[in-house]
Amino acid sequence: MRFLTADYLYPLHITPIKEGVLQLSDGGKIIAIFNNRCEVPQEKLEVFEGILCPGFVNAHCHLELSHLLGIAEEGKGFLNFIGAVQQRDRFSEQDIQKAIEKAEKQMIKNGIVAVGDICNTTDTLFQKQKGNLQYYNFIETFGVYENKIDVVFSRAMGLRKEFRIAGQKATIAPHAPYSVSPVLMRKIANTFDEKDELLTIHNQETKQENELFENKVGAFFDWLNSISASSFIWNSRNKSIDILAELKNQKILLVHNTFTKKEDITTNYYCTCPKANLYIENTIPDYSIFDVDKLCVGTDSLASNDSLSILEELKVIQESSDFDMNTLLKIACKNGAEALGFSILGTFEKGKIPGVNLITSFTKSEIAKLI
């Protein structure tokens, strides 16, 4: 039994508590919250300086790309980044596995307890079966050629089966509106049969993506034509988000949203990965347009980031928004847990086992300012 207290306790399902106390079982289950340190045995009280909050949820990551750290040049744009990612198969299996293990250890050290992870292979499965973190695995699917859709879809279904046999949560996910034809999108939509299953998709990550659908011009338009991609992809959609109309009433997590406009916002969950957006496009979303109860945060991959730290992502968001500390932590913990369906994570509610983070990198004056 432990009694933890700090300058501020952020339960996230109720308002922050100055010098609040968190009671935990030996297994980390939340037993109770106390508003005053005098309510608990003083000899059992563990006092810390800083903030106590639940474990972080990394709502969007590409763990299998961890071996590509430093390969992509910063600020060269998305098409250049794609070229760097295409080098993924030039590495040995041993190097890939070492990078995956190291990246997971980094996430654990940085207070992350759960991950929404994009998967194109089974490379991460060995590490995930160790049970160090909770994962929701999204089997990423690309399909720009109508005559290859059945092959692409069959492979995705096979990967999903492997993850599920291994005891992992897994669903099939379209990569992005510009890389998935309407026919493949309908096939993906038909794979969902439970309410808590989640679909995720990269959305409006670049301005070229918007140019493709809205004006049928630009770098993406030229690129897709150069590889003889199906024109149904852009001719059947006038906006990037039109792809959502091809889905059923599905729970959706839209990722990046760097060039999303207020009129594009729907009732879905949204994930921001600000450090990756700065790394690739040198810009970040307009955070004022989002519903803060539906906004999550991710790190993207070490191919597009120099670290896997939710706290570092929050500091970027803080500099670019008027979010207070409670909102920032909800984005980092509660919202991601809800989106990914990890019901025992995200808040300090009784009976949950969310993990506990101690944040000491914000000064007391900054805390007072942000609350």
Image (cartoon, grey):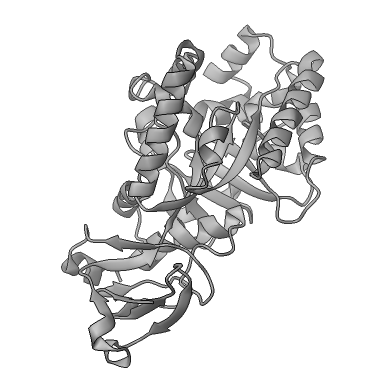
Q: Quadrant of the N terminus?
A: bottom left
Q: Which residue is found at the position 36% from the left and 76% from the top? A: 16
Residue 100 in sight in this render: yes
Residue 166 drawn at (x, y percent): 66, 40
Residue 164 drawn at (x, y percent): 70, 41
Give the mark count: 0
Residue 206 drawn at (x, y percent): 49, 30
Left or right of 141? Residue 209 is left
Considering depth in this image, is 170 or 283 the residue closer to the camera?
Answer: 170
**From this viewpoint, which residue is outermost toward the bottom?**
39
Residue 333 drawn at (x, y percent): 46, 59
Q: Which residue is found at the position 43% from the left and 48% from the top? A: 286
Give residue 24's quadrant in the image.
bottom left
Q: Which residue is found at the position 64% from the left and 56% from the top? A: 267
Considering depth in this image, is 306 or 79 the residue closer to the camera?
Answer: 306
In this view, 2 is above or below 132: below
Considering depth in this image, is 260 or 358 the residue closer to the camera?
Answer: 358
Residue 282 in sight in this render: no
